[in-house]
Image (cartoon, rainbow, N blue to C red):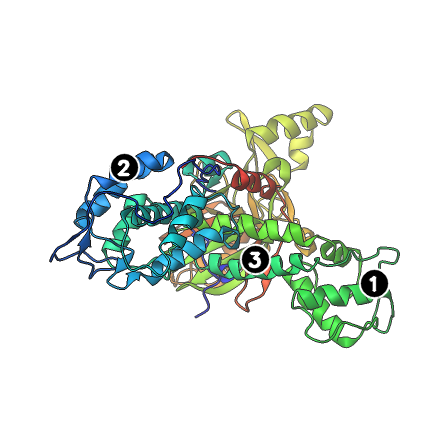
């Protein structure tokens, strides 16, 4: 079963605690002898860890000395004390042959945070390097390096696996359920014998984006791709141009074009490559070179890297476990996806809120289908649109099939109703719901941010039939009748369905292709700034 983001839950559920980058003045001694506390060899049973068989312990008093030497780790002291107390102060990163492989794995990851989409902001980086180098080819265990590795493990876990704090997510109006992690839980994983460095506790889309980040860094290191000239916008098969050669090179670098890109001819292989690129960019798959294609091709590789970085960060927030049956909406993709048993069943086009009235990012439980609905006009629309229109035209309400209702205005059921013939409710504080619309032409557009915040559906009857599929009373003809009867009818679902409204501007689809979409609400730039900021541990 393919379990990639485009066809998996942003459960959906759907950075960082960056440490201050300044290296402390404390330096390890060149000899590698970091303490006067002696090591003791004891015969004890040690809880599971990277090294469950170690019988070597260090004096508990050394922990205080370590924190005094590296004061920026002071916030970790309690977790370190509890962790080592549970293991009787035995070493976790050494065995009888010396330092163990997970320690080298951690060391490599800490020194290569760039590969995680994170800036190189490691506490006591120089000290870590010096300690590791002094311990090279030395089987003797040293408490200072042991405690340094555990501290770096906790810092790395916050960098790469946890992401921004819950408070910062709320400040960005991200209200999806957030993955919760803590230093104690990360250390408990060691005690339970789980090597999180090889079994990463992050939503699996993260690792897929990480591989592409490496590829795009390589493209950047070789100079990126050339800007496509815009002196002529439209080309067709058979044309020859230096711009066509530049397009071929770009598509070859990104993997859309498999063949050689050295010639200037617009051939069939380029048509296929363009269609693949258009599909990955949310464009109409015409296979033609036009203004929209060139605009997308001319996005610099640096910008693509930023998109990968911010969406890797979003993946850090998502719980690793997933719901099996749910509805997933990705705002920048303008799509709704139905999942059954964690597998995509089908999708449909949607219209989301425009920039001034953005669709909220949150989750809820869909509980009701409402046929032939009234539209109760929100106060903001009443104040800003309806009342001014009534002043200009006293017959405005009658003309639009509206009426006063207890001091407000509502639109009567019918084909002209702004909610169409059916709506779907999942009670929430954002007043967001799914609904039909009489404005069908909008679904033909590539970018569909036109609503006041609610989500319009291209195939509302299909969703109604899906949600009521287990109720024999609701046949296709019965649903048609209810939608067109003109009398509002609420139908409670026998079992609610989770709905997750997410925001991802890039992801990897089930075919392994990297998808990019426009940042319709301009959220990426702010998130990138937060990632590059330097909050303390």
Q: Are marks 1 and 3 in contact (CB under 8 Å)?
A: no
Which of the marked residues, 3 or 2, is nearer the chain's N terminus?
2
Q: Is residue 76 visible?
A: yes
What residue is shown at x 24% (from left), y 63% (from top)?
96
Q: Report the front residue among 38 and 119.
A: 38
Which of the marked residues, 2 or 1, is nearer the chain's N terminus?
2
SS of the residue at dot 2?
Answer: helix
Q: Position of residue 514 (x, y in %)?
A: 59, 62
Query: Label 3 crowding class (10 Å Cα cut-off): few <14, some 14-19, many 20+?
Result: many
SS of the residue at dot 1?
Answer: helix
| Figure check: 497 above or below 61 | below
| Numbered circle sitting on residue 65 | 2
Q: Are marks 3 and 2 in contact (CB under 8 Å)?
A: no
What residue is shown at x 52% (from left), y 42% (from top)?
531
Q: Report the front residue among 156 and 427.
A: 156
What residue is shown at x 80% (from left), y 58% (from top)?
228
Report the residue marked by disc 3: 213
Distance of label 3 from label 2 (alpha carbons): 40 Å
Q: Position of residue 94 (x, y in %)?
A: 27, 58
**Quadrant of the drawing holding the N terminus:** bottom left
């Amino acid at each position: 079963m393919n379990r990639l983001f485009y066809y998996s839950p942003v459960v959906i559920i759907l950075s960082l605690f960056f440490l201050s980058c300044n290296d402390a003045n404390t330096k390890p001694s060149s000899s590698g002898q970091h303490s006067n506390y002696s090591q003791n060899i004891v015969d004890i049973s040690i809880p599971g860890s990277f090294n469950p068989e170690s019988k070597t312990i260090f004096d508990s008093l050394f922990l205080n000395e370590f924190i005094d030497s590296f004061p920026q780790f002071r916030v970790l002291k309690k977790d370190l004390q509890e962790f080592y107390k549970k293991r009787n102060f035995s070493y976790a990163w050494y065995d009888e042959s010396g330092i163990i492989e997970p320690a080298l794995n951690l060391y490599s990851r800490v020194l290569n945070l760039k590969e995680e989409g994170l800036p190189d902001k490691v506490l006591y980086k120089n000290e870590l390097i010096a300690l590791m180098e002094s311990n090279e080819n030395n089987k003797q265990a040293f408490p200072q390096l042991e405690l340094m590795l555990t501290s770096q493990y906790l810092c790395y876990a916050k960098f790469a696996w946890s992401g921004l704090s819950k408070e910062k997510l709320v400040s960005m109006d991200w209200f999806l359920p957030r993955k919760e992690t803590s230093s104690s839980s990360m250390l408990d994983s060691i005690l339970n014998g789980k090597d999180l460095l090889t079994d990463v506790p992050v939503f699996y889309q993260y690792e897929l984006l990480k591989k592409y980040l490496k590829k795009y860094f390589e493209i950047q290191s070789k100079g990126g791709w050339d800007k496509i000239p815009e002196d002529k916008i439209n080309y067709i098969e058979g044309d020859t141009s230096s711009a066509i050669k530049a397009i071929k090179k770009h598509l070859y670098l990104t993997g859309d074009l498999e063949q050689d890109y050295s010639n200037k001819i617009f051939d069939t292989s380029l048509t296929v490559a363009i269609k693949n690129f258009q599909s990955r960019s949310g464009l109409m798959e015409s296979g033609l070179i036009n203004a929209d294609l060139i605009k997308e091709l001319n996005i610099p590789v640096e910008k693509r890297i930023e998109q990968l970085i911010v969406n890797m960060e979003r993946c850090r927030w998502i719980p690793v476990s997933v719901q099996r049956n749910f509805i997933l909406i990705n705002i920048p993709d303008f799509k709704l996806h139905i999942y059954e048993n964690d597998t995509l069943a089908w999708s449909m086009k949607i219209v989301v809120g425009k920039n001034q009235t953005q669709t909220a990012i949150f989750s809820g439980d869909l509980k009701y289908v409402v046929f032939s609905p009234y539209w109760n006009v929100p106060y903001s629309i009443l104040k800003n649109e309806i009342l001014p229109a009534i002043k200009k035209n006293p017959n405005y309400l009658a003309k639009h099939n509206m009426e006063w209702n207890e001091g407000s205005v509502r639109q009567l059921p019918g084909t002209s109703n702004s909610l169409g013939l059916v709506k779907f409710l999942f009670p929430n504080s954002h007043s967001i719901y799914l609904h039909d619309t009489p404005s069908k032409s909008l679904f033909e557009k590539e970018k569909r941010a036109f609503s006041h915040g609610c989500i319009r559906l291209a195939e509302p009857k299909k969703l109604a039939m899906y949600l009521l599929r287990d109720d024999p009373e609701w046949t296709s003809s019965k649903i048609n009748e209810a939608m067109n009867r003109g009398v509002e009818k609420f139908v409670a679902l026998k079992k609610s369905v989770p709905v997750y409204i997410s925001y991802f501007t890039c992801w990897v689809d089930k075919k392994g292709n990297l998808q990019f979409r426009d940042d319709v609400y301009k959220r990426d730039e702010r998130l990138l700034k937060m990632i590059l900021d330097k909050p303390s541990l």
